[in-house]
Image (cartoon, coloured by chain):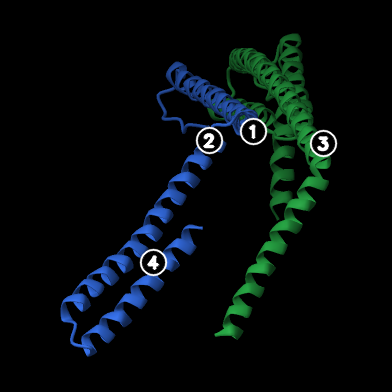
Chain colours: A green, B blue
Amino acid sequence: MKILKDQILNALNLIQSINTKNLTWQAENQDQKIKLSHTAALAEKELAGELAKKAIHLKHEINLIKTKQTAELVMLKTRCKKDIEDYEHYLESLNQLKSAMQSRYSSLPDAIVHTIHHHSKNLLNSMWEAENPEDKFKYELRLIQFITIMHEDIRLNQATTVTDELPENTLKLVHQAHTSFSTTQN
Amino acid sequence: MIIQFALLLFFLAITSFVLTELLDELMLSMLAEYTAQFGSVALLSGFLVLLVTYLILITKSIVVALCHYFSAQQRMDRKLLFFNKHIITLNRLFYFKRKRLLYAFEQERKNICLMDNDKAIKVNPSDKPINKSN
């Protein structure tokens, strides 16, 4: 009984000493605790200010991005409409060349006229559908060369009185194009 | 503190059950009945105290979590995350809007080409059928 009582008393003393130590430590470090809580409050306020500034900056950035993107889309739409108009002009001019060829070379079979017209349209579509600028430029040069040769043939035919001739240079160019195409295929 | 109180109640319950047994041995059945009842009440009270403490703690942590969620700091953090996500969404949307625009105009160009082909077939004076070129 006495041993049990002593053990219980020892346990109680231990608990009390732990509590006393804890209170002493808290009393000694009171100032540091206050300082820490002050610093924490200041840092929190500073962080809140920084976050508010960032929010304003991001809002402004969003408005800028919206404006820029709207302007870019409008410009793209205008450019595409212009491209479509240019394409229509190109088609119109190719049709005019075809009509001119049909009227100058009256004995020329329709199939050949259509082949020439078809070739020029193919060049035009290839130029329009080319994805990188180098291919676009290449097809553009070929189209310009083809139209020039066609126009030259029509002009030369107008200068002469013979009407049974063929547009030799144009047909040569078409044949060259087909040959080079079949070579690349092989 | 609450756990100490609950443990005390359990200890009381066990003591009263032991006392019940002793009283029963000593043929004091009325007292034994009272002590048994007291022991049951003490045991159930101990469990009830623990359960109520648990419920109170859960409710407290839910309220604290809600307070943190609606605090200025977290609201600001969510606002910033929303703005960042909005910028990413705008950029993605712009990419698809641009693609859609280019696709629409490409289709328009192809339609113009087909209409031109049809026009060429219709104005062709020859009676022979012509194969559509494009």
Provide the residue designation for mark 3. Answer: A35
Residue A170 percent coordinates (x, y): 72, 27
Subunit of label 3: A
Subunit of label 2: B
The kind of residue tagged 4 is Leu
Q: Is residue B133 left or right of residue B79?
A: left
Near mark 4 (Cα within 10 A), the count class, few <14, some 14-19 or many ≥20, is many
Provide the residue designation for mark 4. Answer: B9
Provide the residue designation for mark 2. Answer: B67
Provide the residue designation for mark 1. Answer: B77
Circle nearer the viewer, 3 or 2: 3
Near mark 2 (Cα within 10 A), the count class, few <14, some 14-19 or many ≥20, is few
The kind of residue tagged 1 is Asp
Q: In which quarter of the image is residue A88?
A: top right
Q: Quadrant of residue A115?
A: top right
Nearer to the camera, B73 or A52:
B73
SS of the residue at dot 1? helix
Quick one: quadrant of the N terminus of chain A? bottom right
Q: How far apart are marks 2 and 1 (CA)?
A: 15 Å
Q: How far apart are marks 3 and 2 (CA)?
A: 26 Å
The kind of residue tagged 3 is Lys
| N-terminal-most mark, 2 or 1 | 2
Residue A108 percent coordinates (x, y): 59, 24
Same chain check for tags 3 and 4: no
Circle nearer the viewer, 3 or 4: 4
Q: Do the residues labelled 4 and 2 touch (CB within 8 Å)?
A: no
Residue A103 percent coordinates (x, y): 59, 12
| N-terminal-most mark, 4 or 2 | 4
Q: Are marks 3 and 2 in contact (CB under 8 Å)?
A: no
Vertical arrangement, residue A89 with respect to residue A114, above or below: above
SS of the residue at dot 3? helix
Q: In this view, does A18 lie to the left or right of B67?
A: right
